[in-house]
Amino acid sequence: MSDEDTASISAEGLQKQFGGTPVLRDLSLRIEPGAIFGLFGPSGSGKSTCIHLCCGHLRPDGGRLRVLGEEPARFSRAARRRIGYAAQQFTLSPDLTAADNVAFAAGLYGIPEWRSGPDVCAALELVDLGEARAIRARSLSGGMRRRLSLAAALVHRPDLLFADEPTANLDPILRGRIWQHFRQRAAAGATLLITTQYIDEAEYCDRIGLMYDGRLIAEGRPAELRRAAFGGDLIDVVVADRSPTYLRGLAGVAGVRQGEGAPDRALRLVADDAQRAIPQLMEALRSAGAEVQSVAPYQPTFDEVFIRLIERHQTVQREEG
């Protein structure tokens, strides 16, 4: 069996255009079973298009794509039943109740009506719609309809879940509950491809991809992308001397940045490994007789990481163009 056969999703050089305008450019991606992959990027960067291609809603204009070992445009019935899809837009019946909509989805995924009841209740409770089970979908708010779509996508416990901004406009408690469920599904072997407007949710993903202008410009584990954005680990050092030259060239310190988001009176150091560099820093500062006020690792937010990566990509594009 080839490596591609073992991947839940394997894309190579994927291309897609609408009206002659490229919306997905040379996308290569591999997602292993049991992983949560978070796809991030500005609006219009190609995230939803990627999901539609993986679900078989659209055909690629170029490249190769395998999902669960099959071409999405030619999914077998068995493969489709292993997949769950929660769209941004409401696609269920407005005339059915919340419970009937989820039960209908369960039937489409092969769960017999006689045993779907507990699964329907569990899915509605997960998204906090248990008390709305008898309300017709047309009477639900926009946010409740989004949650209903997620319940319908989760009711059959899919092996592969595509969720396009499933936590948009949810309160923090419900967001946390849904991400806990996602983690449980991944621990059970399911694969999840999630897009989200909440940058902090990158922390919940096993791997993350950053898309910009139809391109995947960065991909890896959260810690890997932090290091890639800044060239290593960051350490904030506050000393009485604003320009301690003895820090430059110190073993394990790749750079010293004054300002660039560092707190007032702090120097931001880039180190190969913060845990090993901090004791060396403390020794160097003591040897130099510096008045040390604080030395601490700094973990950049993913807003900072993504902005840095996008700015770097834009710089490269300008230089190449």
Image (spheres, rainbow, N blue to C red):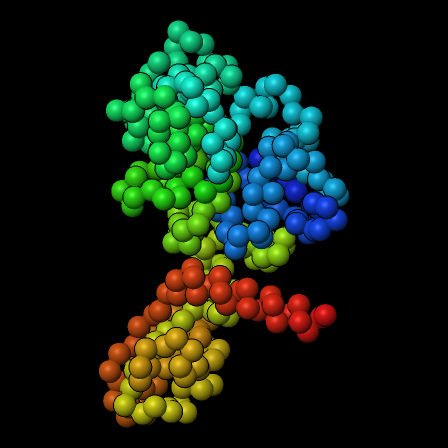
Say which residue appears at 61% left-offset and 18% top-offset.
Answer: 77
Please tell me which residue lies in front, 269 or 54: 54
Please tell me which residue lies in front, 124 or 302: 124
* Percent of width and height locating residue 181: 36, 35
Please tell me which residue lies in front, 37 or 148: 148
* Percent of width and height locating residue 55: 60, 32
Q: Quadrant of the N terminus?
A: top right
* Percent of width and height locating residue 157: 44, 25
Say which residue appears at 66% left-offset and 35% top-offset.
Answer: 58
Using the rendered image of the protein, determine whether residue 75 is visible from the camera's viewpoint. yes
- Examine the rendered structure and indicate whether residue 243 appears above or below residue 28: below
Q: Quadrant of the C terminus?
A: bottom right
The image shows a total of numbered marks equal to 0
- Examine the rendered structure and indicate whether residue 195 appears above or below residue 302: above
* Percent of width and height locating residue 236: 34, 76
Using the rendered image of the protein, determine whether residue 1 is visible from the camera's viewpoint. no
Say which residue appears at 41% left-offset and 92% top-offset.
Answer: 245
Side (left or right) of 72 relative to 129: right
